Amino acid sequence: MNSFTNSQKTQPSNQNNSLSDYVPHNVRIAKRLFDLFSATLLLLITLPLWPLIILAIRIDSKGPVFFVQQRIGVADAEQFHLFNMIKFRTMVTDAEVASGPVWASKNDPRITKTGRFLRKTRLDELPQLINVLKGEMSMIGPRPERAGIMAKLESQIPLFNERMYGVMPGITGLAQVYQGYDETIEDSRNKLGYDLAYSVSLVGLLSWIRMDLHIALKTVSVVILGRGQ
């Protein structure tokens, strides 16, 4: 099992080859340019919603507006990179003090009324646009996990670490739009195939464009129809 710490970097399992070896330079550049453009555009479009969301969170429950949590980011041949992911707070303050790191369930009592709406419409993810602009996340990619949960998953799911090799974690992704939020290890196991399929799509510019366009359209339907958890 890998050891995940509070440092900014941590070691992944040894791999002779990683998916990053097969992602062409032009795909990396194009994906980053797309991230910068789309994150900036979405931030400008949704910025008027931020005061309303902030007010709703403050009225609904005590605590900070934003929820910041360390997550496992992109991995290269030597290490995983850790970063602080930002979300609008959807749970009561100190929700995991007693339980430690656990996934939220569909009817989790820790989720506030406002938080339930934000999660259903995925509006709680909006602050992650800042993570994208900082180069810590992509608009589209595998969901970043917490260190405590990641250690458990990699010990029980073969190839789980490979989903992050050379691939930036995303706000949305193939696994997210088809499987939703994780509640169990089996959910993560089912998502792995989607994450690896996305990584394979990065081997060519056209396959990446087709995949990201498909995911973007699916994400819009999830948001509009309120199919988030």
Image (cartoon, rainbow, N blue to C red):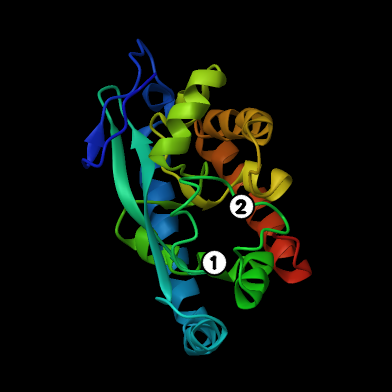
Quadrant of residue 108 within the rendered picture = bottom right
| 229 sits to left or right of 94 | right
Give residue 87's position: percent from left, percent from top.
Answer: 45, 65
Please name the residue that numbered disc 2 is placed on.
104
| 49 sits to left or right of 35 | right
Quadrant of residue 133 within the rendered picture = bottom left
* Front residue of 85 and 105: 105
Q: Which mark is residue 91?
A: 1
- Asked whether the residues under the numbered discs 2 and 1 touch, taking CB atoms below 8 Å apart as contact, a structural biologist would say yes
| 50 sits to left or right of 3 | right
Upstream in sequence: badge 2 or badge 1? 1
Check the image and report above or below for 42 versus 213.
below
Give residue 46's position: percent from left, percent from top.
Answer: 52, 80
Q: Residue at x 43, y 28 (%)?
A: 151
Q: Quadrant of the C terminus?
A: bottom right
- Per the model, the C-alpha gap separating discs 2 and 1 is 9 Å
Q: Secondary structure at mark 1?
A: loop
Check the image and report above or below for 223 versus 201.
below
Give residue 93's position: percent from left, percent from top.
Answer: 46, 68
| Amino acid bearing label 1 | Met
Q: Residue at x 45, y 45 (%)?
A: 169
Check the image and report above or below for 220 versus 162.
below
Q: Secondary structure at mark 2?
A: loop
Residue at the outermost right position:
225
* Front residue of 2 and 132: 2
| Amino acid bearing label 2 | Ala
